[in-house]
Image (cartoon, rainbow, N blue to C red):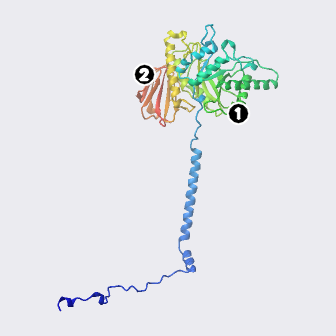
Amino acid sequence: MGKAEDVVLTSQVPSESIPLLGRALPSPTYLSQEEVVQQAGSAPWPGVRKALLCLLGALFACLLALAVLLLVTMPRPRPPLVWWQKASFYHLPPASFPDSDGDGQGDLEGVRRQLDRILAFSIQALVLGPILESDLANLSRILPAHGSQEQLEALVDVGKKEGLRILLELPVWEEELDFPAKHNRTHQHLKGAFQFWQALGVHGFLVGKDPTWRLEAVLDAWSELGAQTKPDRGQEKVLIVRDESERCNISCRVPDSVILSCRLLGAERNLTAQGLAQRAEGALGHPRVPWPGWMVPWGSPLKAGLGEMLAVLQLTLPGVPLLQGGEGSPVPLQNASTEGSSDWALLENLHRSLLTLHASSFALHGVDYIPLPLAGHSEDVFAFLRPGSCSAILVVLNLGPRPFQLILSQLNFLVPAKVLFSTHPEPQRESNVDRVRLRPHQAVLLQVPRGHGQ
């Protein structure tokens, strides 16, 4: 029949290659509860589980110990400085008040008209000399010879607009002899006067350390008033204690918001590296020491180069400068009689540069201070570091009669430093140096990266 007969339909022939769909699958087997318990007990899992738990516990204990160690050893974040901890203060005695009405007597209105000159020196606070009545019961009154309360309020208002705070110096009043009534009356009079002037915008007061009975009374009233008031940020009040003695300290307990202003130059009329190191350590070495401040007694003849050294120290040492105005001051409020003196003109320009640097440099604020003794030059060279947030300022003064070469690598400063200030034309400002040759009685300020040399 041909090819058609050879065709066989596969659907009609059973084939072994086609699986049987109905083939039975093997039935699953299950362990009984007793068998599961038996298998779990005989396997190594309990030991592994205990080992893992012990390892995790040990790891947690190590992490906890590390966290505690970091909390204990890491530096505490310091609260931000208030305005008076980084300000430059200018003290002006009433005898140097400018005359506004031509009567030959300086007054507060004359001071107000000269505020632009103070602001040009980058000064943040003006301390007016004793203009208050010396009668303890009348500390809220101004002596008519120096002006009026209205003139003081106008001065405070202008200062507030220009960012200049006004402080008042307390006069010496007669001591009352009856005790304890004396103490109670003195305390109330002082506290009332503080509150009165602060309400008018006065930001603080200055008082001399001597006599002791007056200082103790002022500190007592200031402490109680500070505990009762919490001023807004930027409105904090400060009390400056001026110490004219050779050894600057306060034996009694000092409350917060107090500056102890010390003389940089004593009766010896000379500066030594060792003496300066001791003064700085004394101002910073104890936790309960008040905030440090520095004064320079101008007006008397100084040795060559000493004025420049004092200016650099006053504006770079830890603490705040209290510049003295009036006769003989290198920072006069008005054109002084020393106008033709080249030495005083240089001192004025030097103060202007240093005050600008102090106002703009974070490293010169606060009290961070690292002395850097120089082997072989410990008597003539005074060097210290003022650390900042990103960089530090290295201050070097050659107090001796011979030149001195500072090699930064010997102090572990491995990168060039930027010259911020120099009392001589060399080295030039803004230049980068890795060594500096200092002349006798020369000072330089260098900006170095933070962490180097520390």
**286 lies above or below 172:** below
In the rendered image, residue 189, in percent from the top left (x then y), is placed at 75, 23
Give the percent coordinates (x, y) of residue 293. Answer: 60, 25
Q: Using the image as rendered, state which of residue 83 and residue 393 is in the foreground.
A: 83
**Pointer 1 residue:** 227
| Mark 1 residue type | Ala
Q: Name the quadrant containing residue 237.
A: top right
Q: Is residue 156 visible?
A: yes
Q: Tell which of 134 and 233 is nearer to you.
A: 233
Which class describes the residues within 10 Å of circle 2: few (<14), some (14-19), or many (20+)? some
* Residue 372 shows in this picture: no
Q: Where 162 falls versus 333 (above or below)?
A: below
The total of numbered circles placed on residues is 2
Above/below status of 275 relative to 21: above
- Between discs 1 and 2, the one toward the N terminus: 1
Q: Is residue 241 left or right of residue 23?
A: right
Disc 1 secondary structure class: helix
Identity, as a three-letter code, of the amino acid under mark 2: Glu
Residues 432 and 171: in front is 171
Q: Nearer the viewer, residue 22 or 231?
A: 22
Left or right: 244 in relation to 424: right
Which residue is pictured at 64% across the width and 22% down the height? 167
Furthest residue toward top: 103
Give the SS element for disc 2: loop
Residue 326's label in the rendered image is none
In the rendered view, would you say 350 is above or below 15?
above
Distance Cα–Cα, label 1 vs label 2: 51 Å
* Label number found at residue 426: 2
Mark 1 or 2: the one toward you: 1
> Residue 449's spot in the image, x, y percent?
46, 35
